[in-house]
């Protein structure tokens, strides 16, 4: 789902290189075709990175019952080949099922679900 100037566009295609280390490569193809890529960091690999989104945003896009307790937080910065930058934050279980939000420098909010 995309909210912002790209609202109504097709969804995003995301690829994640899960290797069990807590860090790896992530890429997203935006609805307008721009490819953005970068590294993600999960759990202890994230360090002291401040949250990207407040819980009000998580409730808005995943419902007021969304509760990341017992999930690991992760984040990444994805840069595109045409200038797009997406700040990504997500929560995943130990089985790599999770939920994420991203915001780009054009005011678009991306909602995504993570499946192994």
Image (cartoon, rainbow, N blue to C red):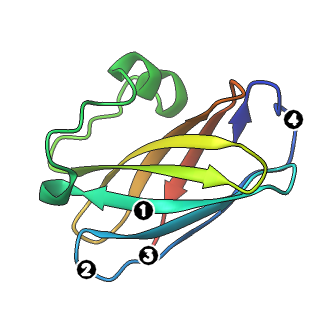
**Alpha-carbon neighbours of circle 4 within 10 Å: few (<14), some, or many (≥20)?**
few
Secondary element under disc 2, as helix, strand or loop, is loop
Label at residue 39 = 1
Q: What residue would you read off at disc 3?
A: 116
The answer to whether marks 2 and 3 mark residues whose Cβ atoms lie closer than 8 Å is no
| Mark nearer the N terminus (2 vs 1) | 2
Q: In the rendered view, does 44 fall on the left or right side of 55? A: left
**What's the residue at 39%, 26% (across, down)?**
53
Q: Earlier in the sequence, mark 2 or mark 4?
A: 4
Q: Which label lies toward us, 3 or 1?
A: 1
Which element is circle 3 on?
loop
Q: Is residue 96 above or below residue 77?
A: below
- Measured Cα–Cα span from mark 1 to mark 4: 28 Å
Q: CA distance from mark 4 to mark 3?
A: 26 Å
Judged from the image, the secondary structure of the residue bearing numbered disc 1 is strand
3 or 1: tag closer to the N-terminus: 1
């Amino acid at each position: 789902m995309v909210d912002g100037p790209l609202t109504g566009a097709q969804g995003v295609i995301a690829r994640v290189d899960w290797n069990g280390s807590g860090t790896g490569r992530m890429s997203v193809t935006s609805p307008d075709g721009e490819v953005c890529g970068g590294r993600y960091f999960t759990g202890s690999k994230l360090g002291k990175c401040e949250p990207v989104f407040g819980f009000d945003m998580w409730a808005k896009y995943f419902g007021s019952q969304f509760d990341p307790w017992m999930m690991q937080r992760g984040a990444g910065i994805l840069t595109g080949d045409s200038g797009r930058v997406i700040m990504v934050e997500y929560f995943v279980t130990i089985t790599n099922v999770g939920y994420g939000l991203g915001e780009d420098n054009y005011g678009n909010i991306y909602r995504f679900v993570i499946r192994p």
